[in-house]
């Protein structure tokens, strides 16, 4: 089975981003998974505090290890979450045919990557299945 790449979208939440990455790193498939990080740029009217948080997130993502590879795409200007997700997911799907998409506020269990990869494999030829969604159980 070829593992689906992990696509992570980040912006200006350093603590959330760190929690998300640390949870992914605890997965048994992390070291065999490619991680693609898309970091949106600051909004035109961003405050200095917001710009500092964006800087902190970017500093952190450049130190991430524990994956087969880490590829980072940083935008100079803000594209907005919807545009960033559409562009990033499209890029990875066109390249790999599948993806596990995570935003910077998702803390996964240690079995998450295995579950998602198994589900993607199980349903890959099932035309009625468009995506696999794991609901937040808060």
Image (tube, rainbow, N blue to C red):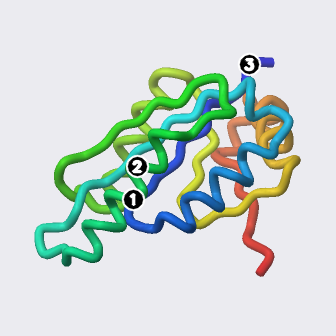
- Residue labelled with disc 3: 2
Q: Mark 2 and 1 residues: CB-CB less than 8 Å, in contact?
A: yes
Q: Residue at x 81, y 42 (%)?
A: 27
Mark 2 vs mark 3, CA separation in Å: 30 Å
Secondary structure beneath label 3: loop
Q: Residue at x 66, y 47 (%)?
A: 131
Of 96 and 50, which appears nearest the observer? Answer: 50
Mark 1 vs mark 3, CA separation in Å: 33 Å
The mark closer to the camera, 1 or 3, is 1
Secondary structure beneath label 1: helix
Residue 96 occupies quadrant: top right
- Residue labelled with disc 2: 59
Q: Position of residue 101 (x, y in %)?
A: 58, 47
**Image position of 13 (left or right of 22):** left
Q: Is residue 93 above or below residue 64?
A: above
Q: Residue at x 19, y 48 (%)?
A: 76
Label annotation for residue 56: 1
Please tell me how crowded label 3 is: few (under 14), some (14-19), or many (20+) other residues with Cα within 10 Å. Answer: few
Task: Return the residue found at the far top.
Answer: 1
The mark closer to the camera, 2 or 3, is 2
Q: Point out the image quarter for the C terminus.
A: bottom right
């Amino acid at each position: 089975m070829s593992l689906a790449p992990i696509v992570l979208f980040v912006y200006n939440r350093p603590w959330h981003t760190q929690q998300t990455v640390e949870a992914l790193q605890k997965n048994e498939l992390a070291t065999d998974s490619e991680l693609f990080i898309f970091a949106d740029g600051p909004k035109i009217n961003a405050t200095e505090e917001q710009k500092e948080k964006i800087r902190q997130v970017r500093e952190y993502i450049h130190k991430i290890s524990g994956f087969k590879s880490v590829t980072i795409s940083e935008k100079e200007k803000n594209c907005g979450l919807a545009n960033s997700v559409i562009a990033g997911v499209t890029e990875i799907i066109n390249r790999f045919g599948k993806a596990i998409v995570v935003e910077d506020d998702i803390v996964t269990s240690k079995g998450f990557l295995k579950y998602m990869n198994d589900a993607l494999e199980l349903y890959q030829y099932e035309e009625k299945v468009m995506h696999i969604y794991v609901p937040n159980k808060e």
